[in-house]
Amino acid sequence: MAKANFSEKIKDFMESKNGRSVTIGLIVIISLVIVLELYVVLTPRVPPVEQSSSNKEAVVQKETPEDKTTEDASSEEDSFEIYLIKDPFEPLVKPQSDDSGSGSTSGGEESQSTLTLKDIYTEDSTKYTSIDVGETNYKVKEGDTFATNYKVVTIGTDSVTLLYGDETINLEIGSSISK
């Protein structure tokens, strides 16, 4: 009998004006909670990007799993990757005050100089080339910048490809070019 009285009281409450208001309020609250949960679950997570203005590096935080040990979580190197942001308008070869080649250097840059490929050889399994710029001899390998404006792109068996600003220069052994 007690169960029947309780059921009847609930039924009477639900049919009253207050009962309907409470029911509608509960439905609205439950619907909002479900929509909020769906939003949180379905929204893609994008790692935050911070840009350091002095070094032009972007720092991106990696997503880390929740079950990391305390040793892994304490290491900042494991949780961040650093990407270098490149300026598309910055020249590939920058003028340097320090020459990377061997030999003597003149105080200023010559307005017209002769570029001569003397030799290509291998030393300690690294290909080197001997190039004269004016009267200065440079011993350089691939990737080196010499005489302020020249960068060695590739060293072949009998030729060298250089980059002078955005101009590509191909020199064979014994050949010369004026720049």
Image (cartoon, grey):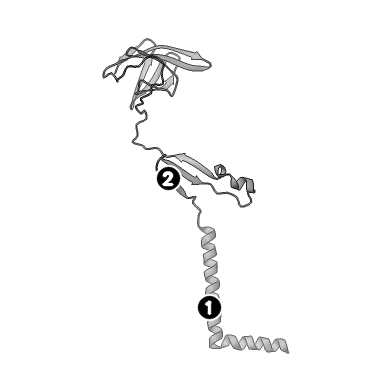
Number of numbered markers: 2
Gap in angstroms between the C-alphas marked 2 and 1: 47 Å
Tell me, for residue 40, which label it has, or none: none
Q: Which residue appears at 37% of the width and 18% of the height? A: 170
Which three-letter amino acid code belongs to the residue tagged 1?
Answer: Gly
Residue that protrudes farthest toward the left in the picture:
111
Q: Which residue occupies the foreground of this view, 137 or 120?
A: 137
Q: Earlier in the sequence, mark 2 or mark 1?
A: 1
Query: Splitting the image into 4 quarters, where does residue 8 fall?
Result: bottom right
Q: Which residue appears at 52% of the width and 58% of the height? A: 42
The residue beneath circle 1 is 25
Label 2 neighbourhood size at 10 Å, few (<14), some (14-19), many (20+)? some
Residue that protrudes farthest toward the right in the picture:
1
Badge 1 marks a residue whose secondary structure is: helix
Q: Which residue appears at 67% of the width and 87% of the height? A: 6
The residue beneath circle 2 is 51
Q: Is residue 47 left or right of residue 177?
A: right
Q: Is residue 108 left or right of residue 9?
A: left
Taking 49 as reference, is 119 above or below it? Answer: above
Q: Are marks 2 and 1 in contact (CB under 8 Å)?
A: no
Residue 130, position in %: x, y?
Answer: 41, 13
Which three-letter amino acid code belongs to the residue tagged 2?
Answer: Gln
Residue 118, position in %: x, y?
Answer: 39, 11
Q: Which residue occupies the foreground of this view, 88 or 73?
A: 73
Label 1 neighbourhood size at 10 Å, few (<14), some (14-19), many (20+)? few
Residue 20, position in %: x, y?
Answer: 54, 83
